[in-house]
Image: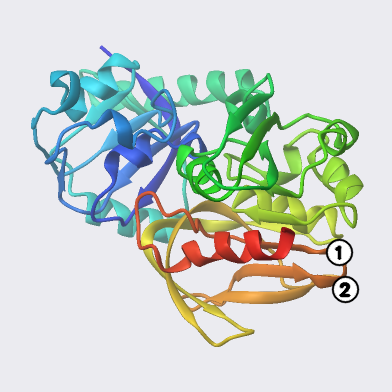
């Protein structure tokens, strides 16, 4: 039987289970879905955010066995990649528990008794946490540069892959003529040698302070090329600008988070998936541009003189509302 070990987190999205489990940002996490029914529209290959399932496990109340592409259902998809699934769980009750105590590490396993589960879980969690490198981003990113031809008439965009979702790359390919995806550990000089019009720092898993060399290399890009950060990329940009990050008690994961743009007053409904956040005590040359209306945490920053800005949420929104996809248009307008 499959044993799943990981940080237990909850997601409040009503749809999008396939995009969620294939998002590299869920590396080393067991996902608890608050929406009761999962698997009800099967598995569609075109909706994968990467080539594999990254979530370590999946917990839900109801599991539907609807089949679509390759005659696969959701359980088949998880099993194919060696990931466990647990159904029949009151996930909303479990979510309340996670909100109270934070996001602990947990184990999904078969056992004869509760005592056996407790004993086995402690051992498995300790073993895995000792074995996993602290830089989760490097475990999920490309190791070779990937060059792609876009549909746009012009523009070269460099993507630094911290665990990029396919939806982000697809949004860029619709707007620009060339997109190159670079490894998270690529030196700034190599990216600048490619002569991009702009750089996108992507989403990814884990703690931004453990991503080897990332903040330093982004610092070496500042002022030389326009930069847009998304999620992990937003946090790494903040570190490069002299800011700090901290871990949230239970994170933001779902597609229903209201965010206000402080410059325009507009409010977006956003898709989110992160456990860390940028602290508001930023250097004077960096301003908070957007905030989360649930808890007032930082959702966007801007360093105008350096042509660098970023958002904590996912403007590509796969799954989720498309309110903020206009940010890709803003990026296009400001680099060409």
Q: Are marks 2 and 1 in contact (CB under 8 Å)?
A: yes
List x then y, in percent, for residue 289.
67, 76
Q: Nearer the viewer, residue 227 or 253?
A: 227
Give the CA distance from mark 2 to mark 1: 9 Å
Q: Nearer the viewer, mark 2 or mark 1?
A: 1
Horizontal arrangement in the rendering, residue 272 relative to residue 185 (left or right): left
**Label 1: few (<14), some (14–19) or many (≥20) C-alpha neighbours in 10 Å:** some
Where residue 101 appears, as percent x and y from the top left, is 44, 55
Q: Picture coordinates of residue 284 (x, y %)? A: 88, 76
Residue at the spot x=48%, y=66% of the render? 324
User: Which residue is depicted at the point 34% across and 15% down?
Assistant: 82
Residue furthest to the bottom in view is: 265
Does residue 153 sit above or below 53 in this rendering?
below
For the N terminus, give its image quadrant.
top left
Nearer the observer, 53 or 318 = 318
Instruction: Identify residue for label 2.
Output: 285
Q: Quadrant of residue 235?
A: bottom right
* Residue receiving disc 1: 306
238 shown above or below 209: below
């Amino acid at each position: 039987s499959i044993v799943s070990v990981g940080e237990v987190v909850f997601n409040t999205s009503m749809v999008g289970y396939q995009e969620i489990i294939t998002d590299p940002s869920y590396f080393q996490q067991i996902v608890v879905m608050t929406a009761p029914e999962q698997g009800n529209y099967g598995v569609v290959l075109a909706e994968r955010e990467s080539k594999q399932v990254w979530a370590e496990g999946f917990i839900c109340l109801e599991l539907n066995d609807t089949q679509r592409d390759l005659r696969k259902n959701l359980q088949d998809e998880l099993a194919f990649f060696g990931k466990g699934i647990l159904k029949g769980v009151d996930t909303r009750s479990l979510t309340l528990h996670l909100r109270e105590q934070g996001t602990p590490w947990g184990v999904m396993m078969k056992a004869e008794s509760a005592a056996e589960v407790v004993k086995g879980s402690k051992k498995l969690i300790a073993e895995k946490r000792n074995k996993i490198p602290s830089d989760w981003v490097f475990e999920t990113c490309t190791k070779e540069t990937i060059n792609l031809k876009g549909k746009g008439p012009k523009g070269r965009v460099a993507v630094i892959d911290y665990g990029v979702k396919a939806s982000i790359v697809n949004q860029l390919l619709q707007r620009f003529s060339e997109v190159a995806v670079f490894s998270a550990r690529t030196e700034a000089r190599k990216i600048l040698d490619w002569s991009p019009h702009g750089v996108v720092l992507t989403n990814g898993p884990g703690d931004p302070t453990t991503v080897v060399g990332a903040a330093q290399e982004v610092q070496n890009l500042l002022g030389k090329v326009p930069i847009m950060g998304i999620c992990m990329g937003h946090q790494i940009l903040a570190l490069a600008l002299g800011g700090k990050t901290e871990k949230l008690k239970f994170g933001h994961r779902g597609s229903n988070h209201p965010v206000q743009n402080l410059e325009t007053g507009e409010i977006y409904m956003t898709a989110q998936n992160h456990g860390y956040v940028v602290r508001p005590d930023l250097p004077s040359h960096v301003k908070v541009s957007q905030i989360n209306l649930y808890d007032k945490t930082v959702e966007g920053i801007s360093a105008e003189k350096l042509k660098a800005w970023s958002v904590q949420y996912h403007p590509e929104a796969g799954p989720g509302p498309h309110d903020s996809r206009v940010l890709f248009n803003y990026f296009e307008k400001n680099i060409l």
